Amino acid sequence: MNATNTSAASRSRFALLALDVVLITVFAALGRDTHEHGLDPAGVLLTASPFLAACLAGWALLGRWRSPARIWPAGIILWLFTVAAGLGIRALAGGGVAPSFAVVTLLVLGLFLLLPRAVAALVRRSRRNRQPGQPASAGDRLTDRA
């Protein structure tokens, strides 16, 4: 792997990490809005913080993983770790962890953390299946820049 590929891989990892952070924050904002707790930025970040900390810890644990964008095993491990550790941190901080909240957290964060990886897998598959010399689609050109 040359320096250009390494740089592109680093940018791709950073973009995926940033997307994970944004989607976890959206999860917290949706929950606060659903329960009419308000959408002030400090409140949203406070609600999101246990899951953000868990996700960042998961990324650190998976930091040497060759393919963090893959659904299996990296995406599944990150998702389950983020949910379990996030709920644990929330419980230790005195926040509610009712079974219904845990189920919603598992499902929503599953969707939010795995969907970008599923899209990346589809893009990789379409690139592999494209015939040599065939022009790239608009989607391929967009993901080539990422």
Image: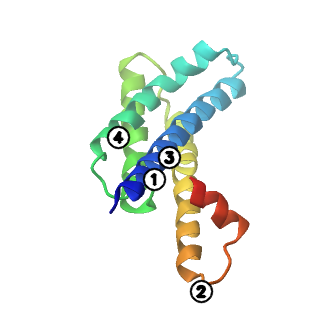
N-term mark: 3 or 4: 3
Query: What residue is at 66 percent from the left and 73 percent from the top?
Result: 136
Q: Name the kind of residue labelled 1 in the image.
A: Ala
Distance from label 1 to label 3 (Cα)?
12 Å
Q: Position of residue 78 (x, y in %)?
A: 39, 47
* Residue sitting nearer the eye, 67 or 135: 135
Work out whether mark 1 precedes mark 2 in sequence or the reverse, and give the earlier one: 1
Numbered badge on residue 8? 1
Q: Which residue is labeled 3 in the image? A: 16
Identified at 58% across, 38% down, the residue is 23
Asked which secondary structure carries label 3, the reply is: helix
Left or right: residue 116 versus residue 137 is left
Query: Is disc 4 placed on a helix, strand or loop?
Result: helix
Q: Earlier in the sequence, mark 2 or mark 4?
A: 4
Sooner in the amino-acid sequence: mark 3 or mark 2: 3
Could you give the CA–CA distance between mark 3 and mark 4, rounded to whole angstroms?
A: 13 Å
Question: What residue does disc 2 label?
Answer: 131
Q: Residues within 10 Å of mark 2 (few under 14, many from 20)?
A: few
Residue 32 pos. (x, y %): 65, 24
Q: Residue placed at 68% from the left, 64% from the top? A: 139
Callout 3 amino acid:
Leu
Q: Residues within 10 Å of mark 4 (few under 14, many from 20)?
A: some
Q: What is the crowding at mark 1: few (fewer than 14 residues within 10 Å), some, or many (at least 20)?
A: some
| Distance (Cα) linking label 1 and label 2 | 23 Å
Q: Give the labeled residue for mark 4.
A: 58
Query: Dots 1 and 3: beta carbons under 8 Å?
Result: no
Residue 142's place in the image compared with 140, above or below, is above
Res. 103 in view:
no
